[in-house]
Amino acid sequence: MREFIVVSVLHQPVWLPFIESLVPAGFPSPALDHESAALDLNALLLPHPDATYLIRCFGDSMMGGEDGIRSGSLLAVDCTLKPQSNDVVIASLDGMDYTLKRLIQRPDQSWWLVPDNPTYTAVPIESPDVFTVWGVVTHIVNETRPGKLGQHVRAR
């Protein structure tokens, strides 16, 4: 099942505290310097505000991959980027609904839409003239406490 929800974005800087030191996956050292800077979350996620959007995905075809895309993930999608092999893209093939898949060019130069979940099959792009990429996914936000994202989305 494929379903997308497009999320409206604010085109102003969103400065958030940013700690430059890396956090180890284990126990952090108390000796680390915790000086903080600020990070503009909009500049990071939406470098081309008029051609970038946020969207949530549903379904499990991209679960299990290295990028950690799962049902409910919030995706930043940039429409200005030229898709390259191994990019995760939102695409339409043969006029079908949109789909979220990895765009792969195989050694024989053929192009495929490949799900990260190995239980799904890859789809060859046999007619490039009926294939459209609607954007390249540049960032993925996953909730560790699912269900809160919807509370922060509002109609324009």
Image (cartoon, rainbow, N blue to C red):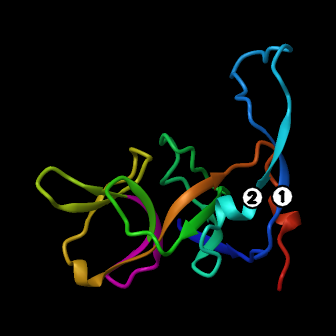
Per the image, the residue denoted by label 2 is 41
Q: Residue at x 52, y 61 (%)?
A: 137
* Mark drawn on residue 111: none
Give the magenta part as a residue range.
91-102
Q: Residue at x 76, y 76 (%)?
A: 11
Q: Secondary structure at mark 1?
A: strand
Q: Residue at x 83, y 86 (%)?
A: 156
On screen, residue 154 above or below 142: below
When asked about the image quadrant of residue 138, the answer is bottom right
Q: Residue at x 75, y 48 (%)?
A: 143
**Which three-letter amino acid code belongs to the residue tagged 2?**
Leu
* Mark drawn on residue 15: 1
How far across and how far down the image is residue 36, in percent? Answer: 85, 38
How far across and how far down the image is residue 49, in percent? Answer: 65, 76
On screen, residue 112 above or below 36: below
How far across and how far down the image is residue 93, in percent? Answer: 34, 77
